[in-house]
Image (spheres, rainbow, N blue to C red):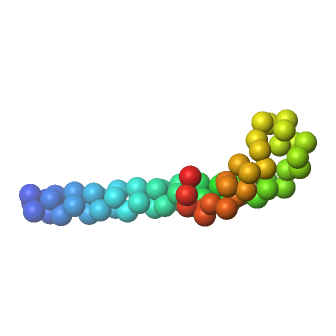
Amino acid sequence: MTMTERSADLGHASSTTTLSQLVARLSSLLSLWRRRTVTRFELARLDERMLRDIGVTHGAVELEVSKPFWRA
């Protein structure tokens, strides 16, 4: 194997690793967005008694639930 062939192989491995990392990050981001959506939906379903138990006001719930899924 020549030096050029080895360099080409390393370049290919690097781009594969980068693509793999990109896919992993995208998967993680989608998972985070899904968790936020589900959590906000569940929070919106809590009644006043449950909100008092956890120390959250109805106004705070409305603020949180109104956020888009991509915003923390």
Q: Position of residue 35 (x, y in %)?
A: 66, 54
Which quarter of the figure has residue 38? bottom right
Question: What residue is rendered at 18% in x and 63% in y?
Answer: 8
Q: Residue at x 84, y 55 (%)?
A: 45
Q: Nearer the viewer, residue 39 or 4?
A: 39
Taking the image as drawn, is residue 22 in sight?
Answer: yes
Describe residue 42's horizontal placement relative to residue 4 as left or right.
right
**Residue at the (26%, 63%) spot, across then down:** 12
Report which quarter residue 41 is drawn in.
bottom right
Percent of width and height locating residue 40: 72, 55
Q: Residue furthest front?
A: 59
Q: Is residue 55 left or right of residue 22?
A: right
- Quick check: can you spot residue 34? no
Quadrant that contains the N terminus = bottom left
Q: How many marks?
A: 0
Q: Name the one closer to the observer, 42 or 18.
A: 42
| Residue depicted at x 88% and y 46% | 48
| Residue 51 left/right relative to 70 | right
Tell which of 51 and 25 is nearer to you.
51
Residue 14: percent from left, percent from top: 27, 57
Residue 21 locus on image (x, y percent): 40, 56
Left or right of 31? Residue 49 is right
